[in-house]
């Protein structure tokens, strides 16, 4: 299957700082990327969907000014958590899909964010 | 009511047992059904992908979809300790579209 990477794999930051997480599709062009959040012992909750070159579509209840998503190229999307607080501590996972990958979603390994 | 319901477990079985994992759903528009395996602190890995109703087999894994009952299953034969993970069902109404996940079932296979 196709490969999706995320960087960093783990980040610890102080409350009030901003954190950027990168998601890359390594061997296919991702026309669509998805960002999920997963709390311990819970399922993946979709935060937003982004299509290359256009604004992201956010799910209900997700603050778009707090979780900034940029999908500037067919291989890279970034999620920036602005003014992070301890309640933002979670496991953030991206997935990518594209025509060359039969529109199947391939998931990255996730980024564990801890806000102190 | 959640769109997708899945018993979170945990489920513990001896090595070699047949494991049955299930999800129910309420949205009749779902057409694509998936099972993912997720090891601790890792991203989900696609195990099985099924379109509409029917069965699909891949090695020790069999996926079943019964759209009339809005019920999907994953069977694991000859379970191994390496199968210990959380199994998530997911479904979508369109190919490549938004996925709705179940809560995940934590499976432990004891040697």
Image (cartoon, coloured by chain):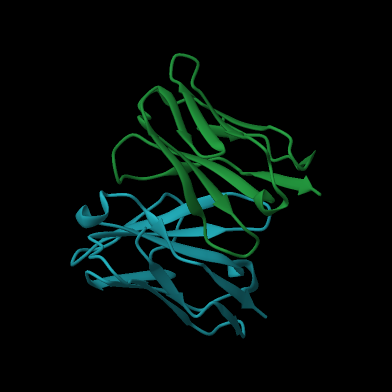
Chain colours: A cyan, B green
Residue A50 lies left or right of residue B36; in this view the side is left
Query: Quick check: A28 above or below B105?
Result: below
Q: Residue at x 40, y 51 (%)?
A: A59
Query: Quick check: A50 above or below A70?
Result: above
Residue closer to the observer: B2 or B61: B61
Q: Residue at x 28, y 69 (%)?
A: A27
Query: Quick check: B8 above or below A70?
Result: above
Query: Quick check: A2 above or below B80?
Result: below
Q: Residue at x 53, y 52 (%)?
A: A44
Residue A56 in picture, x, y percent from top left: 29, 61
Q: Residue furthest top?
A: B68
Query: Dividing the image into 4 quarters, which one contains the N terminus of chain B?
Result: top right
Would you say residue A42 is visible in this rendering? yes
Would you say residue A81 is visible in this rendering? no
Residue closer to the observer: A65 or B11: B11
Residue A8 in picture, x, y percent from top left: 50, 80
Tally the marks. Answer: 0
Residue B12 in picture, x, y percent from top left: 79, 41
Residue B67 in picture, x, y percent from top left: 43, 19
Q: Quadrant of residue B15?
A: top right
Q: Residue at x 67, y 38 (%)?
A: B78
Residue A21 lies left or right of residue B84; in this view the side is left
């Amino acid at each position: 299957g196709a490969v999706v990477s995320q960087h960093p794999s783990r980040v610890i930051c102080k409350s009030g700082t901003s954190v950027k997480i990168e998601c890359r599709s390594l061997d296919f062009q991702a026309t669509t990327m998805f960002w999920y959040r997963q709390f311990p012992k819970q399922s993946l909750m979709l935060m937003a969907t982004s299509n290359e070159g256009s604004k992201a579509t956010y799910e209900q209840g997700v603050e778009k000014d707090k979780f900034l998503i940029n999908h500037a190229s067919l291989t890279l999307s970034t999620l920036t958590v602005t003014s992070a607080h301890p309640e933002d501590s979670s496991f953030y996972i991206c997935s990518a899909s594209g025509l060359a990958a039969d529109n199947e979603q391939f998931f990255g390994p996730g980024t564990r964010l801890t806000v102190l | 009511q959640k769109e997708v319901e899945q018993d979170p477990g945990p489920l513990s079985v001896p090595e070699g047992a047949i494991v049955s994992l299930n999800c129910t759903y309420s949205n009749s528009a779902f057409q694509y059904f998936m099972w993912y395996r997720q090891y601790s602190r890792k991203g989900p890995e696609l195990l099985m992908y099924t379109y509409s109703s029917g069965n699909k087999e891949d090695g020790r894994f069999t996926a079943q979809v019964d759209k009339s009952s809005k019920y999907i299953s994953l069977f694991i034969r000859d379970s191994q300790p390496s199968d210990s993970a959380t199994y998530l069902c997911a479904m979508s109404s369109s190919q490549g579209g938004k996925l709705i996940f179940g809560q995940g079932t934590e499976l432990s296979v004891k040697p």
